[in-house]
């Protein structure tokens, strides 16, 4: 028996390839399915089953594509928002054999109504399950978010509590295999570790230490999560079944930077590259932050021209975008030098330090705003005096009260999100924008006061 974990960087998505005795199953596959086909070839296994733990919100599932390529049957839980067109329904108590491995279905709603967990048994041993694929019900160090049903907040939080109790009954020896790890938008307190057990989670998971069902519900209802607009498109795609992604983008003529037409110029090089020289009007989202912010800020109805350091980074960025449904990447250009040599529309972004910010806070320039673009929980836990809050994902609407002709300094935790936000403000007509590099980490490291 072999269990292979496949981690999708950026999304912090975890899928699994389970094989035994020439048969295989895939749990929660991503859209680019070649990795599962390659594993099946290596193992000499036939993929018989594809199991989904729930309807994913943050990425496109590859289940329908695996079904088309292999003939495997896709299984999904009951009570989806709409019928899953490519899957058959499975319910609590159903069992599936994959050689000497046995999967038993548990209904574990709360994160979504259709959430399932799949309990893994080794038929050679009778003393309890080996592991459990928990989807987004139970993470390592956290539990699933329950904010997708705003009219049923307390009900779905209670359902998750009941589901977690069911999972805790599997035994301390049972290993935990969640669908996401640290950095995912599907939770906020996951441990930066990808292995655990039911016993360890009982002792150490903060959400499992809350005493009683009502207290757990209160805690879940009080959480603050953001729902990016692309989640709805992912939900629809995972009801209908995703199509195969287009081929990797090809290099574009540098002249495209001079006149990209209606394409969005998306700069994925990194914040220091962007600050040093970028195309006027481009949107900065570093390639390792695409999954967090492209779904907020990147229009879905326009082609995308990537500005990358090199071909490898461009292809990696395009694949990441495809995993969250942005397929219209028209091409890429390496570096901003073509703009410089052609006297093209080239801009820089100023970074300022703690001393400069402190001086401005002490004696604010006329019309100046210090804009904190962290999540609201971060802001409320401590912020700089007189700073204004607007979450980066909700720009520019959240900054509509600001005067685009007045100076703005953008800050976050370290400066990365602030640079993304600054590029969005510049795209929307703000004329005087700079970034506090280091941001809250630098501010507190210098011993400066914060407000709550």
Image: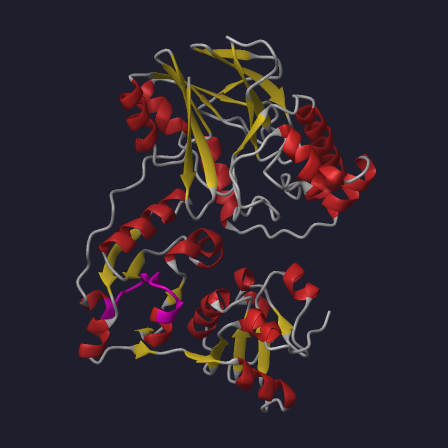
Q: Quadrant of the N terminus?
A: top left
391 horizontally vs 241: left or right: right
Q: Which colour scheme is used?
A: secondary structure
Residue 177 in view of the camera: yes
Residue 353 position within the rendered picture, expressed as x and y whole percent measured from the top left: 50, 81
User: In the displayed structure, would residue 169 be above or below residue 395?
Assistant: above
> In the image, what residue occupies the spot 36% across and 56% down?
302
In which quarter of the view is residue 359 placed?
bottom right
Residue 367 in view of the camera: no
User: In the displayed structure, would residue 298 be above or below residue 358?
Assistant: above
Q: How many marks?
A: 0
Which residue range is magenta in the image? 257-272
Residue 389 position within the rendered picture, expressed as x and y whole percent measured from the top left: 63, 69
> In the image, what residue occupies the spot 36% across and 26% down?
66
In which quarter of the view is residue 263 placed?
bottom left
291 horizontally vs 132: left or right: left
Q: In which quarter of the image is the C terminus?
A: bottom right
Residue 61 position within the rendered picture, expressed as x and y whole percent measured from the top left: 43, 34
In which quarter of the view is residue 374 placed?
bottom right
> In the image, what residue occupies the spot 61% across and 15% down?
128
Residue 38 position within the rendered picture, expressed as x and y whole percent measured from the top left: 28, 27
220 horizontally vs 436: left or right: right
Q: Is residue 199 magenta?
A: no
User: In the displayed structure, would residue 397 be above or below residue 57?
Assistant: below
């Amino acid at each position: 028996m072999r269990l292979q974990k496949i981690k999708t960087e950026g999304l912090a998505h975890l899928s699994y390839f389970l094989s035994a005795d020439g048969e295989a199953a895939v749990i929660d596959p991503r859209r680019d399915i070649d990795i599962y086909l390659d594993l099946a070839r290596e193992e000499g296994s036939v993929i018989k089953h594809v199991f989904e733990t729930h309807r994913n919100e943050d990425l496109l599932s590859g289940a329908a594509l695996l079904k088309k390529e292999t003939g495997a049957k896709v299984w999904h839980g009951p009570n989806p928002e709409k019928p899953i067109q490519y899957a058959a329904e499975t319910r609590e108590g159903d069992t599936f054999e994959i050689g000497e491995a046995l999967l038993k279905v548990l209904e574990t709603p709360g994160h979504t109504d259709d959430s399932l967990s799949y309990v893994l048994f080794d038929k050679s041993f009778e003393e309890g399950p080996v592991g459990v694929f928990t989807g987004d019900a139970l993470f390592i160090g956290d539990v699933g978010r329950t904010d997708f049903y705003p009219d049923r907040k307390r009900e779905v939080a209670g359902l998750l509590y009941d589901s977690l109790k069911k999972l805790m009954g599997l035994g301390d020896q049972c290993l935990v295999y969640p669908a996401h790890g640290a950095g995912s938008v599907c939770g906020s307190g996951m441990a930066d570790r990808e292995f655990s057990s039911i016993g360890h989670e009982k002792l150490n998971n903060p959400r499992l230490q809350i005493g009683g069902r009502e207290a757990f519900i209160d805690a879940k209802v009080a959480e603050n999560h953001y729902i990016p607009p692309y989640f709805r498109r992912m939900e629809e795609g995972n009801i209908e079944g995703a199509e195969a992604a287009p081929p990797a983008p090809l290099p574009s003529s540098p002249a495209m930077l001079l006149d990209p037409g209606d394409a969005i110029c998306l700069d994925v090089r990194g914040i220091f590259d962007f600050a040093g020289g970028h195309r006027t009007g481009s949107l900065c989202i570093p390639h390792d932050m695409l999954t967090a912010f492209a779904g907020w800020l990147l229009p879905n109805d326009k082609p995308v021209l990537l500005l990358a350091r090199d071909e490898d980074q461009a292809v990696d960025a395009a694949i990441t975008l495809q995993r969250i449904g942005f397929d219209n990447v028209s091409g890429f250009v390496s570096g901003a030098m073509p703009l410089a040599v052609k006297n093209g529309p080239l801009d820089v972004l100023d970074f300022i330090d703690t001393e400069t910010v402190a001086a401005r806070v002490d004696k604010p320039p006329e019309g100046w705003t210090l804009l904190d673009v962290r999540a609201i929980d971060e802001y409320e836990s401590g912020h700089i005096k007189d700073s204004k809050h607007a979450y980066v994902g909700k720009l520019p609407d959240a900054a509509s009260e600001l005067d685009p002709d007045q100076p703005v300094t953008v800050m976050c935790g370290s400066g990365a999100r602030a640079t993304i936000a600054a590029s969005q403000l510049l795209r929307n007509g703000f004329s005087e924008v700079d970034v506090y590099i280091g941001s809250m980490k630098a501010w507190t490291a210098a011993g400066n006061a914060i407000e709550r």
